[in-house]
Image: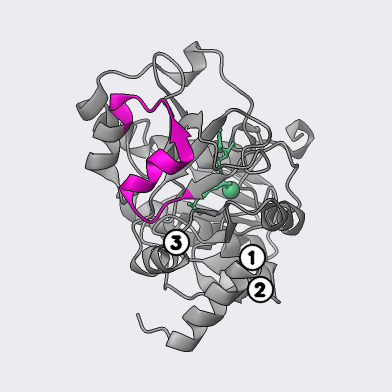
Amino acid sequence: MSLSADALSRALAALAAGECIGLPTETVYGLAADAENPEAIRKVFARKGRPADHPLILHLGAVGWMERYARDIPAQAFDLAERFWPGPLTLVLERGAAVPLEATGGQDTVALRMPDHALALEVLRRFGRALVAPSANRFGGLSPTRAEHVREAFPDLIVLDGGPCRHGIESTILDLSREPPLILRPGAIPRHALETVIGKLPIAAEVPRPRVPGGLPRHYAPETPIRLLPREALSSTTGGSLVLAIGTLPEGLSGIALPNDPSAYAQRLYAALRELDRAGAASILVELPPNEPAWEAIQDRLRRAAATPDRAS
Ligand code: TXA
Ligand code: MG
């Protein structure tokens, strides 16, 4: 990855001036702004078209920054940060005084993570403060995994090109502000990896949970209707559809086949959905992934993408 010193200093100057930039991370690209500047945070909401009560994730340049942005931090948070940061784990903690309410949608908890991407970390360290960074797509759209996806959504934005995102699916969000802790959004770090550090986690469906935008039924969705089907059922559907298959495309069908490995599949998922969405098919038929823990985050994103529009809010 080569990036001119000039591009970096322009990005830093924009952040210092309270503007947004496109920031690569290991999960998806973020629409980043100064997390301590309420005016800059308002610009993020305005650009995304995101309701102001939907909280943002703060991105940190070092594990030690956690204590600036959270308070009453439980020991589990330090254990998890030591094991998984930098990396795709977001921790929800009690909000520290340095965090404006604009960033948390008025809540007294805050979501923190330290991204595992060299360019993101360089920007954070040089900026010296946390950056809010929701995925750099318009509200409800597909998350961007390449710089050009961000430029398509926001043509006038300064975008740092950090190459294709390594994970391609958003961070796992773990709420440590409640007892027992709860996974609010499955993501790039699987449940069992967290459980090796803090023990068994409850399943979200069994516990009352706060309303979060990633929790809306329809999210991460392309324009073309999506249907999730078992592999055997893909071929029996009528023409005009494109297929997103696992491993190989079934005989006689057109579309895209993604690798039969959850990490490799996730890395290419959003780009594949964009490509299929663009092809102008009547619908996109998605092969149901195996019902296995390693596919949990992918299952989650596909179910949301397939949720019918009238269930959106
Ligand atoms: O991988 C990621 O997490 C990416 C990259 C850019 O870091 N970011 C991302 O941000 O996915 P966004 O804004 O698209 O999703 C943020 C999620 C939302 O579902 C939001 O509700 C949740 O984080 N969240 C933020 N603060 C929260 C809080 N205090 N309590 C509960 N959920 C929170
Ligand atoms: Mg998002």
**Residue 32's image quarter?**
bottom right
Q: Are marks 2 and 1 in contact (CB under 8 Å)?
A: yes
**In terms of depth relative to the viewer, which is nearer, 109 or 289?**
109
Q: Residue at x 41, y 83 (%)?
A: 3
Q: Residue at x 28, y 26 (%)?
A: 75
- Select label 3 or label 2 by which is in front: 3
Q: Amino acid at mark 3?
A: Gly
Res. 128 mark: 3
- Which disc number belongs to residue 20? 1
Can you tell which of label 1 and label 3 is closer to the viewer? Answer: 3
Where in the figure is residue 108, as x and y percent of width and height? 59, 27
User: Which residue is the site of mark 2?
Assistant: 157
Q: Is residue 288 visible?
A: no
Between discs 3 and 2, the one toward the N terminus: 3
Question: Up-down: is 288 above or below 144?
Answer: above
* Residue drawn at 55 percent across, 54 percent down: 133
Who is closer to the viewer here, 221 or 6? 6
User: Is residue 138 in the magenta section?
Assistant: no
Residue type beneath disc 1: Cys
Mark in the foreground, 2 or 1: 1
Under mark 2, the amino acid is Leu
Give the secondary structure at mark 3.
loop
Task: Name the quadrant containing residue 236.
Answer: top right
Which residue is painted at 42% across and 64% down in the image?
Answer: 120
Q: Earlier in the sequence, mark 2 or mark 1?
A: 1
**Which span of residues is magenta-colored?**
59-77
**Mark linked to residue 112:** none
Q: Is residue 138 visible?
A: yes
Quote the CA–CA distance across marks 3 and 2.
Answer: 22 Å
Distance, label 1 to label 3, CA atoms, is: 16 Å
Percent x, y of residue 94: 49, 28
